[in-house]
Amino acid sequence: MTEARGAVPLQFEGLDDVLAALRARGHRVSIACRLVLDALFAADGPLSAQAIAGGTEAGATRLEATSVYRNLERLEELGVIRHVHLGHGPGLYMLIGTGEKEFLLCERCERVTTVDPRELDPIRGAIAERFGHQARFTHFPIVGLCATCAEAAAESTSAAIP
């Protein structure tokens, strides 16, 4: 699935807001769509389509993968969710809700840090000034070392020098 370019993020606070917005835009809310949304609202972070299809909780209804992907694509086109690629795993889906998020990924321990986009504006500004490129980090994270892994790497480098 490709990113829904130009989809204006839908501002919402909860599931009822999303359901009302879908219906107001003329979309039918199927059982599968409701289950996908339920899984996303119940999650602590981004979810894979496979996790949604398999049910994330004991006793959760299993869904056909094609139905999950179809609903995820529609929800992304409507600005309800975004997908992100964090590391080498599958695309992950998350609610946009009250705003976009950007990510930092540690290439050593795979820790993901969610960042408010405003915190990366100085980096974005430096890239724009130097290269004329308007950078976004909502689809792919900034990859590097977290503070803990960077410190461990520095310690192991200094210990190796006689």
Image (cartoon, grey):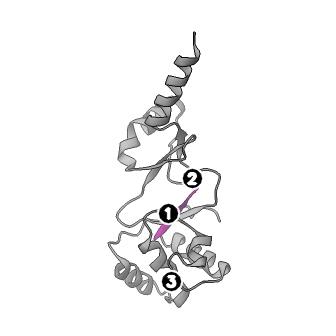
- Between residue 22 and residue 15, name the one nearer to us: 15
Does the CB distance between marks 3 and 2 fall below 8 Å?
no
User: What label does residue 35 carry, if any?
Assistant: 3
Q: Is residue 65 left or right of residue 35?
A: right
Placement of the C terminus among the 4 image quadrants: top right
Q: Dot 2, how many residues are within 10 Å of its Cα: few (below 14), some (14-19), or many (20+)?
A: many
Name which of mark 3 and mark 2 comes first in the sequence.
3
The answer to whether 100 is drawn above or below residue 150 in the figure is below
Residue 54 drawn at (x, y percent): 60, 77
Where are the magenta residues, as a range? Answer: 80-85
Name which of mark 1 and mark 3 comes first in the sequence.
3
Residue 89 drawn at (x, y percent): 64, 56
Q: CA distance from mark 1 to mark 3?
A: 16 Å
Q: Which residue is mark 2?
A: 86
Does the CB distance between marks 1 and 2 fall below 8 Å?
yes
Residue 50 drawn at (x, y percent): 62, 71
